[in-house]
Image: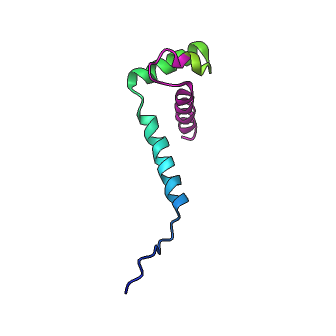
Amino acid sequence: MADSGHTSNYTDQDTKDAKSSANQDSNLQDFSEDEVSLIARMFRLVGKRWSLIAGRIPGRTAEEIENYWTAKNRSSKQR
């Protein structure tokens, strides 16, 4: 009878890490052009006051906006 156990070299944590990375990348694409434009304009006006910026974008939290901005700028600085 064949062994039905897992013989994969990947662990559950590897799968979770891959999904987390994919979610972070897709989250950057979840912002509309209008939201991105507004975030950039607000950032120039008020700086890193994420909660103030989030207050102008319905359905967005300060944390989402900060994560987006940080990831976007980290990517552009590496180029």
Residue 51 shown in magenta = no
Residue found at the far bottom of this picture: 1
Predominant SS along the magenta part: helix
Q: Quadrant of the C terminus?
A: top right
Q: In the rendered image of this protein, does residue 33 appear above or below residue 27?
A: above
Residue drawn at point x = 58 percent, y = 32 percent: 70
Number of numbered discs present?
0
Q: What's the residue at 48%, 14% (across, down)?
A: 56
What's the image's color scheme?
rainbow
Expressed as whole percent of the image width and height from the top left, the position of residue 11 reads: 53, 64
- x then y, percent, for residue 16: 51, 54
Q: Quadrant of the N terminus?
A: bottom left
Q: Residue at x 45, y 75 (%)?
A: 5
Q: Residue at x 57, y 15 (%)?
A: 52
Q: Residue furthest front?
A: 1
Nearer to us in this view, 12 or 48: 12
Classify residue 66 by image quadrant.
Answer: top right
Does the magenta run of residues contain 63? yes
In the image, residue 77 lies at what x, y percent?
A: 58, 36
Is residue 77 positioned above or below 1 on the image?
above
Span shown in magenta: 53-79
